[in-house]
Image (spheres, helix red, strand yellow):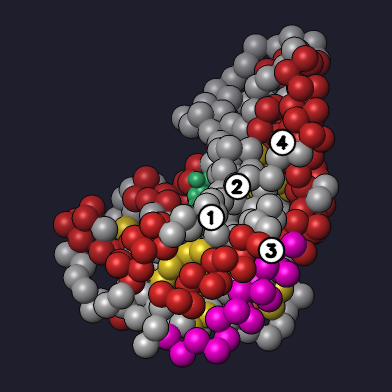
Amino acid sequence: MKVEFFLPNITTDDKKSVLKVLDSGFLSTWNTVKRFEDDLAKYLRAEYAVGTMSCTAALHLCLLTVGVGRGDEVITTPLSFVATANAIELAGAKPVFVDVEKDTGIIDVSKIEKAITKKTKAIIPVHLYGHMCDMKALSKLAKRFKLPIIEDSAHAIEAERDGIKPGELSYAACFSFHSLKNITSGEGGAIVVHDEELARRLKILRLHGLVRTASDQYKKVYRHNEMECLGWKYNMNEIQAALLVSQLKRIDKQWGKRHQLVANYDKGFRNNPAIATMKTLSGTKHAHHLYTILVPSDQRDELLQEFQQRGIGVAINYTTIPLMKYYREKYGYKMGDFPVAEYIGSRTITLPFYPRLTKKEQDYVIKVVNELVKV
Ligand SMILES: *Cc1c(COP(=O)(O)O)cnc(C)c1O
């Protein structure tokens, strides 16, 4: 049996939505992007959304609007995709890592205060695997130090904690629509904010610093454009937006399917003493982005190969960022600096997990994993 690690769920409606755009004559940033931004803001109970090329671009732009640059520090987690820390490097600042909680893998909010210095300019928490950080506690701390929070919500579009959604208690929340994410446009991202002026600045920064978009110029009487500042080329296009508008309509239905898959996996591994699973804290709606298990660290890498030999696609989310060559060499990080993140990073395996995964496939994965992972 072959079980793919991931398969996107693109329906006939999604394809129709794209074809409509392809026939419309407008392919760059236009009405469909605006429509997606409105729909996303509504879904997240937010005021404004700004579509971008990626979540990395979204994080980068947010840091620029805060004024983060050379000599500054930004606090984040060591257990994430490299993009989180890379965005800080792109802005010219230094990522300062704070270790994570063992049960969930998310940044340990109680350890953040000790990492704050005079150079700290922002905090980027990651809602890892779809489990939200304690945004109430974090925003209290951030207010005390007058630090903006930029949420890396790449995993967490459907998440809630204590009734709070991503973006509700922060300066901005950034989302990813990369092909492995919960809804996807192949590549894509968005930023959600409350402040109108901030939304305007982000829209200017995502397109060269130009004040007027092509659609403004086309729809209204022609006016010469003005470049207000040096911006980037990070705008979302109509094809991406068409895919996302269509998927956003069934986002909760897809979440429901993944919720059921989690229950099946949890039940399947419950009686295996060699496997630990991540916890969902009370008061939390998990977005269920990835399903990971922890196995004995001395068996982990061998298990990856064995799973693959049995036809099961697997991945590692994540090897800790500070132990990546670039960060090791630039900042001198070594094993032992972030023990909890390393504990998870050396034991974790991500299993196939997506709405199209069938019961038969999942049962096969559970059977093989239980056969191969032993104390
Ligand atoms: C995927 C991901 C990103 C980057 O998203 P892109 O859209 O590919 O730039 C950032 N942070 C986390 C936690 C991710 O998983």
Question: Which numbered mark, 4 or 3, is in the foreground of this view?
Answer: 3
Q: Is residue 321 above or below residue 62?
A: below
Which residue is labeled 4 in the image?
Answer: 243
Which residue is labeled 1 in the image?
Answer: 1
Which residue is labeled 3 in the image?
Answer: 359
In the image, is residue 265 part of the stretch drawn in magenta?
Answer: yes
The residue positioned 37% from the left and 45% from the top of the image is 90
Question: Which numbered mark, 2 or 4, is in the foreground of this view?
Answer: 2
Q: CA distance from mark 2 to mark 1?
A: 16 Å
Q: CA distance from mark 3 to mark 2?
A: 15 Å
Residue 163: image x %, image y %?
A: 76, 75
Part of the protein shown in magenta: 257-274
Q: Name which of mark 3 and mark 2 comes first in the sequence.
A: 2
Q: Give, as a three-letter code, the residue at label 3.
A: Lys
Quarter occupied by residue 119: bottom left
In the image, is residue 108 part of the stretch drawn in magenta?
Answer: no
Q: Mark 3, residues whose alpha carbon is within 10 Å: few (<14), some, or many (≥20)? A: few
Q: Name which of mark 2 and mark 4 comes first in the sequence.
A: 2
Residue 133: image x %, image y %?
A: 58, 74
Query: Residue 368: which numbered mark, if any?
Result: none
Which residue is labeled 2 in the image?
Answer: 7
Q: Nearer the viewer, residue 23 or 238?
A: 23
What kind of element bears circle 1? loop
Q: Give, as a three-letter code, the residue at label 1.
A: Met
Q: Is residue 340 above or below residue 288?
A: below
Q: Give, as a three-letter code, the residue at label 2.
A: Leu
Residue 5 is left or right of residue 116, and the answer is right
Question: Which numbered mark, 2 or 1, is in the foreground of this view?
Answer: 1
Q: CA distance from mark 1 to mark 3?
A: 13 Å
What kind of element bears circle 3? helix
The residue positioned 64% from the left and 81% from the top of the image is 267
